[in-house]
Image (tube, grey):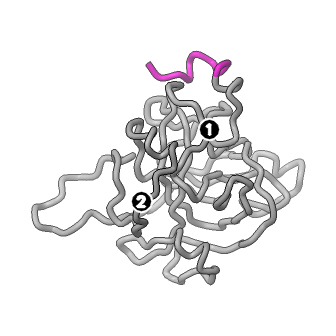
Amino acid sequence: MCRGGRLIADFVAGTDARPGLSEELHEHLTTTVNGLWVVWAHKLARQAGDLFVPLTGGSGYPADARAQCRYRGVRGAHDVPDPRCTCGFHALSSPRLPGLPFGHGCTALTVALSGRVLAFEWARGGVLWRAERQTVVRFERSALSERAEGIPGKRRHPGDPDGRPAVVPGVTPRDSGPVRLNLPVSSPVLPVCDDDAGWCVEFSTLEHSPASLVLA
């Protein structure tokens, strides 16, 4: 799983109060249609039906879920995520995928993080996030090579992100304006302590992953 460096922020997202973050971190925030502030982040996983399976394996998670610590009985009760634990959903601030091999059924996810969120320094640049709640907004398995090369582009607040929606919404009336990010009202609670943003997996891990996790 991904392990970040120094803890640089510990805050709550998913409310109408703008988190008091530095300019470097604030650029990764966006708002939902209801005016809730969330963290915009990126990760890799394998898609298995309606679930997304971390590259390190596991049972997978749905498009929207809230994390619970799997080891809370051993390490004592604590909020998720906790700086002293590995619990929570992991994601990175950059959509670029340096050094990660493709063609192993990897799916690039764009996620909105909310609830308690921790930000850590990331050795390869950017920020490693660990969050209480994760909502998969978009996923795509194409056009990854351009991102892997790190081709810069103009950054914009992702009201209408590219890619395929993780949850297909109802029919939108014509001329109703842009489709904006909107979090589900409720989400299932899952034990999450072995999640991975996808950038931390070695080549050997991908090559020896169980066949049941590899997409056709």
Disc 2 marks a residue whose amino acid type is Gly
Q: Residue at x 88, y 56 (%)?
A: 76
* Secondary structure found at label 2: loop
Q: Give residue 10's quadrant in the image.
A: bottom right
Q: Position of residue 212 (x, y in %)?
A: 56, 18
* Secondary structure found at label 1: loop
Which callout, 2 or 1, points at the residue further toward the start of the chain? 1
On screen, residue 62 above or below 121:
above
In contact (CB < 8 Å): disc 2 and disc 1: no
Q: Which mark is residue 153?
A: 2
Residue 17 left/right relative to 199: left
Quarter of the figure with the C terminus: top left
**Is residue 209 found inside the magenta-colored segment of the image?**
yes
Residue 29 left/right relative to 67: left
On screen, residue 73 above or below 115:
above
Q: Residue at x 48, y 59 (%)?
A: 186
- Secondary structure mostly seen in the magenta stretch: loop
- Specify the segment rendered in magenta: 207-216
In front of the other: 180 or 208: 208
In front of the other: 52 or 162: 162
How far apart are the two marked residues, 2 and 1, measured between alpha carbons?
A: 19 Å
In front of the other: 119 or 170: 119
Q: Which mark is residue 99?
A: 1
In the rendered image, is residue 129 in sight?
Answer: no
Q: Give residue 120's quadrant in the image.
A: bottom right
In the rendered image, is residue 25 in sight?
Answer: yes
Q: Position of residue 133 (x, y in %)?
A: 58, 58
Disc 1 marks a residue whose amino acid type is Gly
- Dot 2: few (<14), some (14–19), or many (≥20) neighbours within 10 Å? few
Q: Position of residue 103 (x, y in %)?
A: 50, 25
**Is residue 158 found inside the magenta-colored segment of the image?**
no
Q: Which mark is residue 136?
A: none
